[in-house]
Image (cartoon, rainbow, N blue to C red):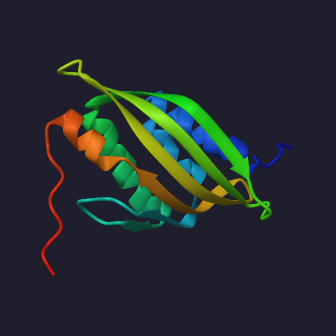
Amino acid sequence: MSETRSPREVFHALLDGITAGRFAELAGLYAEDAVVEMVYQPVGPRRVEGRAALRERFLAVGERALLELSADNVVVRTTDDPEVVVTEWDYRARHRATGREVTVANLQVLRVRDGLIVHSRDFHDHAALADLLGTPPPQPAAR
């Protein structure tokens, strides 16, 4: 009988899968009804619900494969809630076509239940990624 992965182990499996480019496997780390909030996402949905929708997003990213990512400065902090970890890391992102590189700061708050991510709040430096890809992030609409 296999043991259920801890929140720390699930985060490392997610990070390892992303940096290895195994995008087709990533949805398997999420619960069927998982919710992912991408708080600073400049374009597109800021909230994705369900494993199926996450699978589509991961597969789309994997098909484009524009970047090579490696992780540095990884810190995982436990909280007084045993289901929740707060994670910080930097991606070293390299554009495959141009060879340009940037460092991208990341913070993620994960809730893991029964070895699966049920909720995630993601804070990524989208401006650094947009700069690397040569696509400036859109400006927010005037209010």
Name of the residue lying farthest toward the top = 99
| Residue 27 appears in the figure | no
- In the image, 81 versus 65, the foreground residue is 81
Name of the residue lying farthest toward the front = 143
| Residue 82 appears in the figure | yes
Residue at x-position 60% and y-position 35%: 74
Q: Position of residue 68 (x, y in %)?
A: 35, 26
Q: Position of residue 27 (x, y in %)?
A: 50, 50
Residue at x-position 32% and y-position 59%: 41
Relative horizontal placement of residue 87, taking residue 79 as reference (left or right): left
Q: Position of residue 121 (x, y in %)?
A: 51, 61
Residue at x-position 30% and y-position 66%: 45
Name of the residue lying farthest toward the right = 1
Q: Position of residue 76 (x, y in %)?
A: 67, 43
The C terminus - image quarter: bottom left
* Number of residue marks: 0
The N terminus - image quarter: top right
Determine which quarter of the picture holds residue 75.
top right
Residue at x-position 56% and y-position 49%: 28
- In the image, 41 versus 36, the foreground residue is 41
Relative horizontal placement of residue 43, taking residue 36 as reference (left or right): left
Q: Is residue 135 above or below residue 142?
A: above
Relative horizontal placement of residue 134, taking residue 41 as reference (left or right): left
Q: Is residue 64 above or below residue 30?
A: above
Determine which quarter of the picture holds residue 94.
top left
Name of the residue lying farthest toward the bottom = 143
- In the image, 14 versus 103, the foreground residue is 103
